Amino acid sequence: MFDTLTDKLNSIFRNITGKGRLSAENIQQALNDVKMALLEADVNYKVVRDLLERIQERSLNIEVHQRLNPGQQFIQIVQQELTAMMGSKESGMKLSSRPPTVVMVAGLQGSGKTTTIGKLARMYKNKGHRPLMAAADVQRPAAILQLQVLGEQLGIPVHSSESQDPVAICKEAKKRAESQGFDILFLDTAGRLHIDEALMEELDRIKQETAPDEILFVADAMTGQDAVHTSQRFNERLDITGVILTKLDGDARGGAALSINYVTRKPIKFVGTGEKLEQIEVFHPERMVSRILGMGDLLTLVEKAQESYDEEQAGKLEQKIRKQQFTLNDFLDQLKKIRKMGSLEQLIKLIPGFGRIKELNSAKPDEKELTRIEAIIGSMTPDERGSYQMINGSRRKRIARGSGTTVQEINRLLQQFAKMQKMFRLFGNGGTPAMPSGYPGMGQGNPLDMMGGGRFRNKLKKKRKIKR
């Protein structure tokens, strides 16, 4: 979502860090460029005006820091002010000291409200809570069924009723949560295609009758400033406690994410980063700004890894590698875990410094390669996965037919896996394998090669040759 803005800001910062000293003229030019970049990203013009005033005031009074040149200090000021504009610190969801915590979720139709409730319920179930979801959207016929399907997938109960009164449904759900020991109740309220008085009156009545601890407004980040204006309207009527931004993985310019907290004075609490139920994150303003400025987000990357791996599994994997028992079965398991963390393109952008490398932005990893590898290994017998050396010519033809690939692709995968095993043997013997020069993690025979990284690395090599 922020790719264009990130590119423009990085270009501005490269220019200003090249200056030996900063003058009022240098700063004004940089501010003008930052202003245009933010406006083109669809950031609210009042937000841009106030932001630039604060940056200008601080930039003109820069005190020389012995470790930073003036240009670097200017970048630091922009980073700090952007973070303050987006909320300074993460807030998350506040849980009541007297369960159940009632969470009323509101928003317009099409914003991803019902799916977001499923994501939140899954997140808190994984943290050890007992959530209950209430299907109170009687306006959209498929909403109740959608929530019930999500509940079945997640193993989370859904409260529904034949009643057409959403207020009564919410009251019944709260009583059920209290009597059956559920500690979080998510209320899926009705949405409309646009704000109208009937919708607001209904939401008002639900608020009065259930006394929710949290009122979260779900905003579609793809709608830009419309999301900001709509959140304002909901806030004026319901006094929302926070915002959830969905579809942050889309192609919109990102203005809503940068404006909504400053305009509503209510924090962004969560962001949806994809369609899968695990693709939701607690919103951390400083981390988001770090991504926007192309500085990566290592903490989020670590958290994603922790969600996919536990210490016991990691210990077993380490032992297999040390004992040279790492098989294609293990590799397939690791591949699936990595895919659960998100797309390779998203993960690479979380690595500090990678977002600023132009070649990485244009030569994207081949996600289809992951699917091909899964299909190839899935077409092997258990014995073949355990001992790939037994895969002869006839077996390769059978695997190619079963996976919809070619014998050449089977050969390439097995050759790369053999190189990776050789690298693991060096690690297991206490050695350090020599990695070819290039970007970190791009060495031939490493796991990234086997997940589309090989083609990715070749594109980078071609670009370098052209430049020379």
Image (spheres, grey):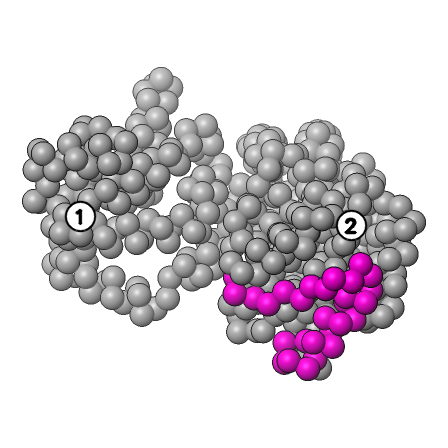
Asked whether the viewer can see residue 154, the reply is yes
Residues 213 and 430: in front is 213
Q: Amino acid at mark 1?
A: Thr
Which residue: 35% across, 50% down?
336
Coordinates of residue 210 in the picture (x, y in percent): 81, 71
Asked whether the viewer can see residue 96, the reply is no
Which residue: 39% across, 36% down?
367
Task: Tell me whether circle 2 and circle 1 mark residues in contact (CB < 8 Å).
Answer: no
Q: Quadrant of residue 330?
A: bottom left
Q: Which of pointers 2 and 1 lies earlier in the amino acid sequence?
A: 2
Q: Amino acid at mark 2?
A: Gln
Coordinates of residue 39 in the picture (x, y in percent): 74, 32
Which residue: 86% across, 51% down?
199
For residue 191, side relative to residue 454 (left or right)? right
Q: CA distance from mark 2 to mark 1?
A: 50 Å
- The residue that disc 2 covers is 139
Q: Looking at the rendering, in which quadrant would you find the C terminus?
A: top left
The circle on residue 61 is none
Q: Looking at the rendering, in which quadrant would you find the N terminus?
A: top right
- The residue that disc 1 covers is 381
Answer above or below: position of 311 versus 350: below
Magenta region, residue range: 154-182
For residue 211, side relative to residue 396 (left or right)? right
Secondary structure at numbered mark 2 = loop
Is residue 104 on the magenta stretch?
no
- Crowding at dot 1, Cα within 10 Å, few <14 / some 14-19 / many 20+, comes out as few
Residues 229 and 196: in front is 196
Which residue: 47% across, 32% down?
361
Secondary structure at numbered mark 1 = loop
